Amino acid sequence: AVFTNHDYEPIAKDRDATVRQALAADGRELFTFKDQVIFEASEILTGQDQPFSVFTPYKNAWLKALRPFDLRPYPVDAYRKALAPVPATHRQALPTLESLGFAPSNLKEIAMPTGMDGAQALFREFQTRMGDYGQRRDFPALRGPSYLSVHLRFGTISIRALARTAHDTVQRGGTAAAGAAIWLSELIWRDFYFMILHHHPRLAEGKSYHPEYDAIRWVDLHTGNEYFEAWCQARTGYPLVDAAMLQIRQSGYMHNRLRMVTASFLVKDLGVDWRRGEQYFADQLNDFDFSANNGGWQWAASTGCDAQPYFRIFNPVTQSEKFDPQGRFIRKYLPVLENLPDKYIHAPWTAPDDVLAAAGVRLGENYPRPIVQHGVARMEALERYGAVKGSKAKSAD
Ligand SMILES: Cc1cc2nc3c(=O)[nH]c(=O)nc-3n(C[C@H](O)[C@H](O)[C@H](O)COP(=O)(O)OP(=O)(O)OC[C@H]3O[C@@H](n4cnc5c(N)ncnc54)[C@H](O)[C@@H]3O)c2cc1C
Protein backbone atom coordinates (compact mmCIF):
# COMPACT_ATOMS: atom_id res chain seq x y z
CA ALA A 1 0.00 0.00 0.00
CA VAL A 2 1.00 3.60 -0.42
CA PHE A 3 0.39 6.08 2.38
CA THR A 4 0.41 9.81 1.85
CA ASN A 5 -1.43 12.94 2.94
CA HIS A 6 -4.42 14.85 1.60
CA ASP A 7 -3.86 17.61 -0.87
CA TYR A 8 -6.57 20.18 -1.49
CA GLU A 9 -5.89 21.65 -4.91
CA PRO A 10 -8.07 20.25 -7.68
CA ILE A 11 -5.03 19.45 -9.82
CA ALA A 12 -3.44 17.48 -6.95
CA LYS A 13 -6.71 15.71 -6.27
CA ASP A 14 -6.80 14.61 -9.93
CA ARG A 15 -3.23 13.40 -9.60
CA ASP A 16 -4.09 11.37 -6.52
CA ALA A 17 -7.09 9.84 -8.29
CA THR A 18 -4.83 8.77 -11.15
CA VAL A 19 -2.30 7.29 -8.72
CA ARG A 20 -5.11 5.49 -6.86
CA GLN A 21 -6.31 3.95 -10.13
CA ALA A 22 -2.84 2.92 -11.22
CA LEU A 23 -2.17 1.28 -7.86
CA ALA A 24 -5.55 -0.44 -7.91
CA ALA A 25 -4.76 -1.86 -11.34
CA ASP A 26 -1.68 -3.38 -9.69
CA GLY A 27 -3.71 -4.78 -6.78
CA ARG A 28 -2.53 -2.11 -4.32
CA GLU A 29 -4.16 0.64 -2.35
CA LEU A 30 -3.56 4.35 -1.79
CA PHE A 31 -4.38 5.70 1.67
CA THR A 32 -4.40 9.44 2.28
CA PHE A 33 -4.65 11.28 5.60
CA LYS A 34 -5.05 14.73 7.07
CA ASP A 35 -1.68 16.26 7.85
CA GLN A 36 -1.25 19.72 6.31
CA VAL A 37 -3.93 21.43 8.38
CA ILE A 38 -5.55 21.22 11.79
CA PHE A 39 -9.13 21.05 10.45
CA GLU A 40 -9.96 20.25 6.88
CA ALA A 41 -12.81 20.06 4.39
CA SER A 42 -16.09 19.84 6.33
CA GLU A 43 -14.75 19.41 9.85
CA ILE A 44 -15.78 22.95 10.78
CA LEU A 45 -19.26 23.87 9.55
CA THR A 46 -21.90 26.43 10.47
CA GLY A 47 -24.88 25.56 12.67
CA GLN A 48 -26.72 24.78 9.39
CA ASP A 49 -23.96 22.35 8.32
CA GLN A 50 -22.76 24.75 5.64
CA PRO A 51 -19.18 25.82 4.96
CA PHE A 52 -18.31 29.18 6.48
CA SER A 53 -17.69 32.10 4.17
CA VAL A 54 -16.67 34.63 6.83
CA PHE A 55 -13.46 34.24 8.79
CA THR A 56 -14.33 35.38 12.33
CA PRO A 57 -17.21 32.94 12.95
CA TYR A 58 -15.08 30.21 11.30
CA LYS A 59 -12.24 31.01 13.67
CA ASN A 60 -14.55 30.95 16.69
CA ALA A 61 -15.95 27.56 15.64
CA TRP A 62 -12.39 26.32 14.95
CA LEU A 63 -11.24 27.31 18.45
CA LYS A 64 -14.34 25.78 20.01
CA ALA A 65 -13.83 22.48 18.20
CA LEU A 66 -10.16 22.21 19.17
CA ARG A 67 -9.26 19.22 21.36
CA PRO A 68 -5.81 18.28 22.70
CA PHE A 69 -5.77 15.41 20.19
CA ASP A 70 -5.85 17.88 17.27
CA LEU A 71 -2.57 19.44 18.37
CA ARG A 72 -0.65 16.32 19.29
CA PRO A 73 2.08 14.95 17.09
CA TYR A 74 0.97 11.76 15.37
CA PRO A 75 2.56 8.70 17.00
CA VAL A 76 4.33 7.74 13.78
CA ASP A 77 7.46 6.37 15.46
CA ALA A 78 5.47 3.46 16.88
CA TYR A 79 4.60 2.38 13.34
CA ARG A 80 7.91 2.98 11.65
CA LYS A 81 8.88 -0.69 11.87
CA ALA A 82 5.79 -1.59 9.83
CA LEU A 83 7.09 0.36 6.82
CA ALA A 84 8.49 -1.63 3.95
CA PRO A 85 12.25 -1.06 3.75
CA VAL A 86 13.36 1.04 0.79
CA PRO A 87 14.94 -1.38 -1.67
CA ALA A 88 18.65 -0.72 -2.18
CA THR A 89 18.08 -0.25 -5.91
CA HIS A 90 15.63 2.56 -5.21
CA ARG A 91 18.01 4.26 -2.84
CA GLN A 92 20.64 4.49 -5.51
CA ALA A 93 18.08 5.69 -8.00
CA LEU A 94 16.95 8.74 -6.02
CA PRO A 95 16.72 11.53 -8.56
CA THR A 96 19.05 14.50 -8.27
CA LEU A 97 17.68 18.04 -8.08
CA GLU A 98 19.15 18.74 -11.51
CA SER A 99 17.37 15.74 -13.02
CA LEU A 100 14.11 17.10 -11.60
CA GLY A 101 14.69 20.33 -13.50
CA PHE A 102 16.03 22.53 -10.68
CA ALA A 103 18.88 24.90 -11.40
CA PRO A 104 21.04 26.84 -8.94
CA SER A 105 19.12 29.91 -7.89
CA ASN A 106 20.17 33.49 -8.35
CA LEU A 107 18.14 34.65 -5.36
CA LYS A 108 20.32 37.02 -3.40
CA GLU A 109 18.81 36.64 -0.01
CA ILE A 110 18.30 33.12 1.01
CA ALA A 111 18.66 33.77 4.68
CA MET A 112 16.17 30.98 5.02
CA PRO A 113 17.47 28.07 7.11
CA THR A 114 16.47 24.95 5.20
CA GLY A 115 15.22 21.48 5.99
CA MET A 116 13.53 20.32 9.19
CA ASP A 117 16.46 21.47 11.36
CA GLY A 118 16.35 24.89 9.74
CA ALA A 119 12.62 25.09 10.35
CA GLN A 120 13.09 24.21 14.02
CA ALA A 121 15.82 26.83 14.42
CA LEU A 122 13.60 29.46 12.82
CA PHE A 123 10.67 28.52 15.01
CA ARG A 124 12.77 28.60 18.21
CA GLU A 125 13.94 32.07 17.28
CA PHE A 126 10.38 33.19 16.53
CA GLN A 127 9.16 31.93 19.91
CA THR A 128 11.38 34.49 21.63
CA ARG A 129 9.45 37.27 19.86
CA MET A 130 5.98 35.72 19.42
CA GLY A 131 4.66 38.03 22.12
CA ASP A 132 5.63 41.07 20.01
CA TYR A 133 4.03 39.71 16.85
CA GLY A 134 0.98 42.01 17.10
CA GLN A 135 3.12 45.16 17.39
CA ARG A 136 5.76 44.26 14.83
CA ARG A 137 4.16 42.17 12.13
CA ASP A 138 3.06 45.05 9.89
CA PHE A 139 6.44 46.75 9.56
CA PRO A 140 8.47 45.21 6.74
CA ALA A 141 11.76 46.68 7.98
CA LEU A 142 11.39 44.82 11.29
CA ARG A 143 11.80 41.13 12.00
CA GLY A 144 8.13 40.72 12.90
CA PRO A 145 6.65 37.60 11.32
CA SER A 146 7.89 34.02 11.64
CA TYR A 147 9.13 33.48 8.04
CA LEU A 148 7.87 29.91 8.40
CA SER A 149 5.58 29.98 5.36
CA VAL A 150 8.03 28.20 3.09
CA HIS A 151 8.45 25.43 5.67
CA LEU A 152 4.71 25.04 6.05
CA ARG A 153 4.40 24.91 2.30
CA PHE A 154 7.00 22.16 1.93
CA GLY A 155 6.03 20.26 5.08
CA THR A 156 9.37 20.76 6.84
CA ILE A 157 7.54 21.85 9.97
CA SER A 158 4.35 20.52 11.48
CA ILE A 159 1.31 22.78 11.63
CA ARG A 160 0.31 20.93 14.83
CA ALA A 161 3.60 21.84 16.52
CA LEU A 162 3.12 25.50 15.59
CA ALA A 163 -0.53 25.69 16.57
CA ARG A 164 0.17 23.81 19.82
CA THR A 165 2.88 26.24 20.86
CA ALA A 166 0.74 29.26 20.00
CA HIS A 167 -2.31 27.81 21.71
CA ASP A 168 -0.36 26.86 24.88
CA THR A 169 1.12 30.36 25.01
CA VAL A 170 -2.37 31.85 24.82
CA GLN A 171 -3.67 29.48 27.50
CA ARG A 172 -0.79 30.29 29.87
CA GLY A 173 -1.67 33.98 29.72
CA GLY A 174 1.11 36.43 30.48
CA THR A 175 2.80 38.95 28.26
CA ALA A 176 3.21 36.77 25.19
CA ALA A 177 -0.43 35.65 25.07
CA ALA A 178 -1.79 38.52 23.00
CA GLY A 179 0.86 38.15 20.27
CA ALA A 180 0.42 34.38 20.24
CA ALA A 181 -3.35 34.75 19.81
CA ILE A 182 -2.86 36.95 16.75
CA TRP A 183 -0.33 34.54 15.29
CA LEU A 184 -2.66 31.59 15.92
CA SER A 185 -5.33 33.50 13.98
CA GLU A 186 -2.97 33.63 11.01
CA LEU A 187 -2.55 29.86 11.17
CA ILE A 188 -6.34 29.59 11.22
CA TRP A 189 -6.55 31.80 8.08
CA ARG A 190 -4.43 29.14 6.43
CA ASP A 191 -6.94 26.40 7.34
CA PHE A 192 -9.77 28.73 6.29
CA TYR A 193 -8.45 29.17 2.75
CA PHE A 194 -7.78 25.43 2.34
CA MET A 195 -11.38 24.85 3.44
CA ILE A 196 -12.69 27.49 1.03
CA LEU A 197 -10.83 25.91 -1.89
CA HIS A 198 -12.14 22.47 -0.98
CA HIS A 199 -15.73 23.70 -1.10
CA HIS A 200 -15.29 25.98 -4.09
CA PRO A 201 -13.02 24.18 -6.56
CA ARG A 202 -14.08 26.65 -9.28
CA LEU A 203 -11.62 29.09 -7.63
CA ALA A 204 -8.88 27.01 -9.22
CA GLU A 205 -10.42 27.76 -12.63
CA GLY A 206 -9.77 31.46 -12.23
CA LYS A 207 -13.27 32.29 -11.04
CA SER A 208 -14.08 35.02 -8.54
CA TYR A 209 -15.61 33.81 -5.31
CA HIS A 210 -18.38 36.37 -5.91
CA PRO A 211 -19.21 35.75 -9.58
CA GLU A 212 -20.56 39.24 -10.27
CA TYR A 213 -16.99 40.54 -10.18
CA ASP A 214 -16.06 38.42 -13.18
CA ALA A 215 -17.88 41.10 -15.21
CA ILE A 216 -15.34 43.82 -14.32
CA ARG A 217 -13.77 45.51 -17.34
CA TRP A 218 -10.11 45.50 -16.41
CA VAL A 219 -7.94 48.29 -17.77
CA ASP A 220 -5.39 45.89 -19.27
CA LEU A 221 -8.07 44.57 -21.61
CA HIS A 222 -7.48 47.67 -23.71
CA THR A 223 -4.06 48.95 -22.64
CA GLY A 224 -2.17 45.65 -22.87
CA ASN A 225 0.88 44.95 -20.78
CA GLU A 226 2.30 48.35 -19.94
CA TYR A 227 0.98 48.65 -16.38
CA PHE A 228 1.46 45.00 -15.55
CA GLU A 229 5.07 45.06 -16.77
CA ALA A 230 5.84 48.23 -14.80
CA TRP A 231 4.47 46.57 -11.66
CA CYS A 232 6.46 43.35 -12.18
CA GLN A 233 9.62 45.30 -12.94
CA ALA A 234 9.31 47.60 -9.93
CA ARG A 235 8.86 50.72 -12.08
CA THR A 236 5.58 52.14 -10.76
CA GLY A 237 7.21 55.22 -9.21
CA TYR A 238 5.64 54.40 -5.82
CA PRO A 239 8.66 53.46 -3.69
CA LEU A 240 6.97 51.06 -1.26
CA VAL A 241 5.36 49.14 -4.14
CA ASP A 242 8.60 49.04 -6.11
CA ALA A 243 10.71 47.98 -3.10
CA ALA A 244 8.23 45.18 -2.39
CA MET A 245 8.35 44.00 -5.99
CA LEU A 246 12.14 43.87 -5.71
CA GLN A 247 11.88 41.91 -2.49
CA ILE A 248 9.81 39.17 -4.10
CA ARG A 249 12.14 38.99 -7.09
CA GLN A 250 15.33 38.95 -5.06
CA SER A 251 14.24 36.70 -2.22
CA GLY A 252 11.22 34.63 -3.31
CA TYR A 253 9.39 36.10 -0.29
CA MET A 254 7.28 39.19 0.28
CA HIS A 255 6.15 40.58 3.59
CA ASN A 256 2.40 40.15 4.21
CA ARG A 257 1.62 43.88 4.49
CA LEU A 258 3.37 44.39 1.16
CA ARG A 259 1.52 41.52 -0.49
CA MET A 260 -1.66 43.40 0.41
CA VAL A 261 -0.31 46.76 -0.76
CA THR A 262 1.15 45.55 -4.07
CA ALA A 263 -1.91 43.42 -4.86
CA SER A 264 -4.25 46.29 -4.14
CA PHE A 265 -2.08 48.64 -6.22
CA LEU A 266 -2.10 46.33 -9.24
CA VAL A 267 -5.80 45.67 -9.12
CA LYS A 268 -7.26 48.95 -7.91
CA ASP A 269 -4.73 51.64 -8.94
CA LEU A 270 -3.60 50.04 -12.19
CA GLY A 271 -6.88 48.26 -12.98
CA VAL A 272 -5.11 45.06 -13.97
CA ASP A 273 -6.98 41.76 -13.68
CA TRP A 274 -6.06 40.21 -10.31
CA ARG A 275 -5.47 36.82 -11.94
CA ARG A 276 -2.34 38.17 -13.62
CA GLY A 277 -0.89 39.22 -10.28
CA GLU A 278 -1.91 35.92 -8.73
CA GLN A 279 0.02 34.08 -11.44
CA TYR A 280 3.07 36.32 -11.03
CA PHE A 281 3.17 35.66 -7.28
CA ALA A 282 2.72 31.93 -7.96
CA ASP A 283 5.81 32.05 -10.17
CA GLN A 284 7.90 34.10 -7.73
CA LEU A 285 7.02 32.94 -4.21
CA ASN A 286 8.93 30.13 -2.57
CA ASP A 287 5.99 29.77 -0.19
CA PHE A 288 3.47 29.72 -3.03
CA ASP A 289 0.40 27.93 -1.91
CA PHE A 290 -2.62 28.00 -4.19
CA SER A 291 -5.28 28.45 -1.54
CA ALA A 292 -3.53 31.21 0.45
CA ASN A 293 -2.38 33.02 -2.69
CA ASN A 294 -5.78 32.90 -4.33
CA GLY A 295 -7.38 33.89 -1.04
CA GLY A 296 -4.98 36.82 -0.64
CA TRP A 297 -5.52 38.06 -4.18
CA GLN A 298 -9.27 37.79 -4.01
CA TRP A 299 -9.18 39.54 -0.64
CA ALA A 300 -7.21 42.45 -2.11
CA ALA A 301 -9.31 42.54 -5.29
CA SER A 302 -12.52 42.50 -3.18
CA THR A 303 -13.79 39.57 -5.25
CA GLY A 304 -13.27 36.99 -2.50
CA CYS A 305 -15.09 35.64 0.51
CA ASP A 306 -14.72 37.95 3.48
CA ALA A 307 -12.68 40.26 1.29
CA GLN A 308 -11.95 43.88 1.85
CA PRO A 309 -14.90 45.95 0.53
CA TYR A 310 -14.28 47.25 -3.00
CA PHE A 311 -14.42 50.87 -1.90
CA ARG A 312 -11.54 50.38 0.58
CA ILE A 313 -8.54 51.23 -1.52
CA PHE A 314 -5.08 51.35 0.00
CA ASN A 315 -3.27 54.60 -0.54
CA PRO A 316 0.29 53.48 -1.39
CA VAL A 317 1.79 56.67 0.06
CA THR A 318 0.00 56.62 3.40
CA GLN A 319 0.64 52.87 3.73
CA SER A 320 4.30 53.67 3.22
CA GLU A 321 4.32 56.51 5.76
CA LYS A 322 2.56 54.32 8.28
CA PHE A 323 4.41 51.04 7.90
CA ASP A 324 7.87 52.13 6.77
CA PRO A 325 8.04 55.56 8.42
CA GLN A 326 11.80 56.06 8.05
CA GLY A 327 11.87 54.37 4.67
CA ARG A 328 14.28 51.71 5.94
CA PHE A 329 12.69 48.98 3.87
CA ILE A 330 12.52 51.23 0.82
CA ARG A 331 16.18 52.24 1.13
CA LYS A 332 17.25 48.62 1.39
CA TYR A 333 15.76 47.72 -1.99
CA LEU A 334 15.99 51.08 -3.75
CA PRO A 335 19.46 52.47 -2.99
CA VAL A 336 18.83 55.15 -5.61
CA LEU A 337 16.48 56.79 -3.08
CA GLU A 338 18.85 56.26 -0.16
CA ASN A 339 19.67 59.93 0.36
CA LEU A 340 16.16 61.33 0.13
CA PRO A 341 14.94 62.76 3.44
CA ASP A 342 12.33 60.59 5.22
CA LYS A 343 9.72 63.22 4.45
CA TYR A 344 9.95 62.64 0.70
CA ILE A 345 10.93 59.01 0.42
CA HIS A 346 7.32 57.83 0.24
CA ALA A 347 6.46 60.16 -2.67
CA PRO A 348 9.64 61.45 -4.33
CA TRP A 349 7.70 63.53 -6.87
CA THR A 350 6.61 65.84 -4.04
CA ALA A 351 10.22 66.77 -3.23
CA PRO A 352 11.50 70.20 -4.35
CA ASP A 353 14.01 70.10 -7.21
CA ASP A 354 16.95 71.05 -5.00
CA VAL A 355 16.18 68.23 -2.56
CA LEU A 356 15.99 65.73 -5.41
CA ALA A 357 19.24 67.05 -6.88
CA ALA A 358 21.04 66.87 -3.53
CA ALA A 359 19.89 63.25 -3.13
CA GLY A 360 20.98 62.36 -6.68
CA VAL A 361 17.44 61.44 -7.71
CA ARG A 362 16.49 62.29 -11.30
CA LEU A 363 12.81 61.50 -11.77
CA GLY A 364 12.09 59.87 -15.09
CA GLU A 365 15.79 58.93 -15.38
CA ASN A 366 17.13 56.96 -12.44
CA TYR A 367 13.76 56.55 -10.73
CA PRO A 368 10.35 56.65 -12.46
CA ARG A 369 7.69 59.27 -12.02
CA PRO A 370 4.45 57.79 -10.64
CA ILE A 371 2.76 55.71 -13.31
CA VAL A 372 -0.72 56.83 -12.20
CA GLN A 373 -2.02 59.45 -9.81
CA HIS A 374 -3.50 57.60 -6.89
CA GLY A 375 -6.41 60.03 -6.43
CA VAL A 376 -7.51 59.67 -10.07
CA ALA A 377 -6.87 55.91 -10.16
CA ARG A 378 -8.95 55.49 -7.04
CA MET A 379 -11.97 57.22 -8.58
CA GLU A 380 -11.62 55.08 -11.71
CA ALA A 381 -11.49 51.92 -9.60
CA LEU A 382 -14.63 52.95 -7.75
CA GLU A 383 -16.38 53.42 -11.10
CA ARG A 384 -15.11 50.09 -12.43
CA TYR A 385 -16.36 48.19 -9.39
CA GLY A 386 -19.45 50.37 -9.00
CA ALA A 387 -20.58 49.47 -12.54
CA VAL A 388 -20.59 45.80 -11.61
CA LYS A 389 -22.20 46.33 -8.24
CA GLY A 390 -24.78 48.57 -9.95
CA SER A 391 -25.74 45.84 -12.40
CA LYS A 392 -26.00 43.39 -9.53
CA ALA A 393 -28.18 45.79 -7.58
CA LYS A 394 -30.35 46.24 -10.68
CA SER A 395 -30.72 42.52 -11.28
CA ALA A 396 -31.48 42.05 -7.58
CA ASP A 397 -34.34 44.55 -7.95
C1 LIG B 1 -1.85 38.71 -2.27
C2 LIG B 1 -1.41 37.71 -1.22
C3 LIG B 1 -0.82 36.51 -1.63
C4 LIG B 1 -0.42 35.57 -0.67
N1 LIG B 1 0.16 34.39 -1.10
C5 LIG B 1 0.52 33.45 -0.19
C6 LIG B 1 1.08 32.21 -0.60
O1 LIG B 1 1.23 31.92 -1.79
N2 LIG B 1 1.48 31.34 0.38
C7 LIG B 1 1.32 31.61 1.71
O2 LIG B 1 1.69 30.77 2.54
N3 LIG B 1 0.74 32.75 2.11
C8 LIG B 1 0.35 33.68 1.22
N4 LIG B 1 -0.19 34.87 1.66
C9 LIG B 1 -0.44 35.07 3.10
C10 LIG B 1 0.71 35.74 3.89
O3 LIG B 1 1.14 36.90 3.23
C11 LIG B 1 1.90 34.80 4.06
O4 LIG B 1 1.46 33.58 4.62
C12 LIG B 1 2.94 35.39 5.03
O5 LIG B 1 3.39 36.63 4.55
C13 LIG B 1 4.11 34.43 5.15
O6 LIG B 1 5.08 34.94 5.98
P1 LIG B 1 5.34 34.36 7.44
O7 LIG B 1 5.47 32.87 7.41
O8 LIG B 1 6.47 35.14 8.00
O9 LIG B 1 3.97 34.72 8.14
P2 LIG B 1 3.51 34.82 9.66
O10 LIG B 1 2.94 36.18 9.83
O11 LIG B 1 4.53 34.38 10.61
O12 LIG B 1 2.26 33.81 9.69
C14 LIG B 1 2.42 32.43 10.05
C15 LIG B 1 1.77 31.55 9.02
O13 LIG B 1 0.36 31.78 8.99
C16 LIG B 1 -0.12 31.56 7.67
N5 LIG B 1 -0.72 32.80 7.19
C17 LIG B 1 -0.42 34.07 7.57
N6 LIG B 1 -1.21 34.94 6.94
C18 LIG B 1 -2.01 34.22 6.14
C19 LIG B 1 -3.05 34.55 5.23
N7 LIG B 1 -3.45 35.82 5.03
N8 LIG B 1 -3.65 33.56 4.55
C20 LIG B 1 -3.29 32.27 4.75
N9 LIG B 1 -2.32 31.90 5.59
C21 LIG B 1 -1.69 32.85 6.28
C22 LIG B 1 1.08 31.21 6.82
O14 LIG B 1 1.14 29.80 6.73
C23 LIG B 1 2.25 31.78 7.62
O15 LIG B 1 3.45 31.12 7.36
C24 LIG B 1 -0.62 35.83 0.71
C25 LIG B 1 -1.21 37.03 1.10
C26 LIG B 1 -1.60 37.96 0.15
C27 LIG B 1 -2.24 39.26 0.59
Image (cartoon, helix red, strand yellow):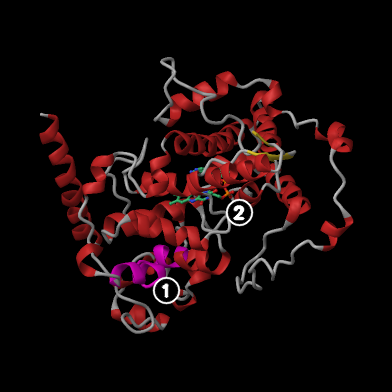
SS category of the residue bearing label 2: loop
Tell whether position 355 is magenta: no
**Which numbered marker is on residue 361?**
none
Identity of the residue drawn at 78% across and 61% down:
94
Q: Is residue 129 above or below residue 109?
A: above
Q: Position of residue 190 (x, y in %)?
A: 53, 39
Q: Position of residue 369 (x, y in %)?
A: 30, 75
| Residue bearing the label numbered 1 | 340
> Quarter of the image holding residue 31?
top right
Tell me the quarter of the image containing the N terminus. top right
In the image, 103 versus 67, the foreground residue is 103
Q: What range of the chain is rendered magenta? A: 226-244
**Which numbered marker is on residue 143?**
2
In the image, 208 versus 58, the foreground residue is 208
Determine whether, in the image, residue 345 is placed left or right of residue 335: left
Q: Is residue 35 above or below residue 355?
A: above
Q: Position of residue 308 (x, y in %)?
A: 34, 41
Q: Position of residue 256 (x, y in %)?
A: 49, 51
Q: Amino acid at mark 2?
A: Arg
For residue 328, say whether it is visible: no
Crowding at dot 2, Cα within 10 Å, few <14 / some 14-19 / many 20+, comes out as some
Determine whether, in the image, residue 303 is placed left or right of residue 179: left
Identity of the residue drawn at 37% across and 36% down:
305
Earlier along the polypeptide chain: callout 1 or callout 2? 2
> Quarter of the image holding residue 43?
top right
Tell whether position 229 is magenta: yes
Determine whether, in the image, residue 5 is placed left or right of residue 387: right
